[in-house]
Image (tube, rainbow, N blue to C red):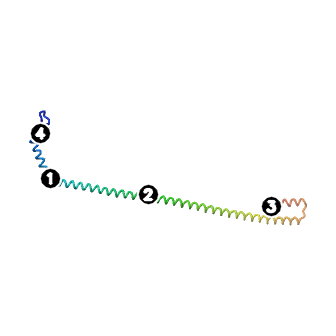
């Protein structure tokens, strides 16, 4: 009821000297007890906590630096691998192009050789056919001349004979 004023509310502006003294004495006793028994423990706990936090910060910095180094190494390896892969791909493309060109050249050479061989065979067959034809014509000419000489034919017989021999030639 000390704090209640005339209106029934708190009267904080009225100072009670007895209360101030006892409050100050109580405060000093609590500070003395804390200083004697708990202050060192509290300061030690705060110092330990500060050291622990600083240690965690240092450890986190170290881990971060290591993580950044590992990340950089990884990125370097990835970039190196990309460059190596591009080199392998380019080399494979180059090799494929060389192989393709060689295969095309080989195929063209083979086609040229086959064509030349075919032309030689055609020319040989043509020469052989012409030669056989010449032999056949010579044989027929001799045979016709022989028959003409054996027979002294009349004009009608001679004409029939020539027609008959020409039809033989046409069949050949």
Q: Answer with mark 4 or mark 2, whichever residue precedes in sequence.
A: 4
Q: Which mark is residue 79?
A: 2
Packing grade of label 2 (10 A; few <14, some 14-19, many >=20) is few
- Left or right placement of residue 8 versus residue 101 in this view: left
Q: Quadrant of the N terminus?
A: top left
Q: Which mark is residue 169?
A: 3
Residue 48 at what x, y percent from top left?
22, 56
Q: CA distance from mark 1 to mark 3?
A: 147 Å
Residue 117 at what x, y percent from top left?
68, 64
Q: Quadrant of the C terminus?
A: bottom right
Residue drawn at 61 percent across, 61 percent down: 105
Q: Which mark is residue 15?
A: 4
Mark 1 falls on what kind of element? helix
- Residue 125 sits above or below residue 45 on the image: below
Mark 3–mark 2 contact, CB under 8 Å? no
Mark 4 falls on what kind of element? loop
- Left or right placement of residue 98 versus residue 55 in this view: right
Q: Nearer the viewer, mark 3 or mark 2?
A: 2
Q: CA distance from mark 1 to mark 2?
A: 63 Å
Q: Answer with mark 1 or mark 3, whichever residue precedes in sequence.
A: 1
Mark 2 falls on what kind of element? helix
Q: Answer with mark 1 or mark 2, whichever residue precedes in sequence.
A: 1
Packing grade of label 1 (10 A; few <14, some 14-19, many >=20) is few
Would you name the residue on which mark 1 appears? 35
Mark 3 falls on what kind of element? helix
- Residue 35 sits above or below residue 17 on the image: below
Packing grade of label 3 (10 A; few <14, some 14-19, many >=20) is few
């Amino acid at each position: 009821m000390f704090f209640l004023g005339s209106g029934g509310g708190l009267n904080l502006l009225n100072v009670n000297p007895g209360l101030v003294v006892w409050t100050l004495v109580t405060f000093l006793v609590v500070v003395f007890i804390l200083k004697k028994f708990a202050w060192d423990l509290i300061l030690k706990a705060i110092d330990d906590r500060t050291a622990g936090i600083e240690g965690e910060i240092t450890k986190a910095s170290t881990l971060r630096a290591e993580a950044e180094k590992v990340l950089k190494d990884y990125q370097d390896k990835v970039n190196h691998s990309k460059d190596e892969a591009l080199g392998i791909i380019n080399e494979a493309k180059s090799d494929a192009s060389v192989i393709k060109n060689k295969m095309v050249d080989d195929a063209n050479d083979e086609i040229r050789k086959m064509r030349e061989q075919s032309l030689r065979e055609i020319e040989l067959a043509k020469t052989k056919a012409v030669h056989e034809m010449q032999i056949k014509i010579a044989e027929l000419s001799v045979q016709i001349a022989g028959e003409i000489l054996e027979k002294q034919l009349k004009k009608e017989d001679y004409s029939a004979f020539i027609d008959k021999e020409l039809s033989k030639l046409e069949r050949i």
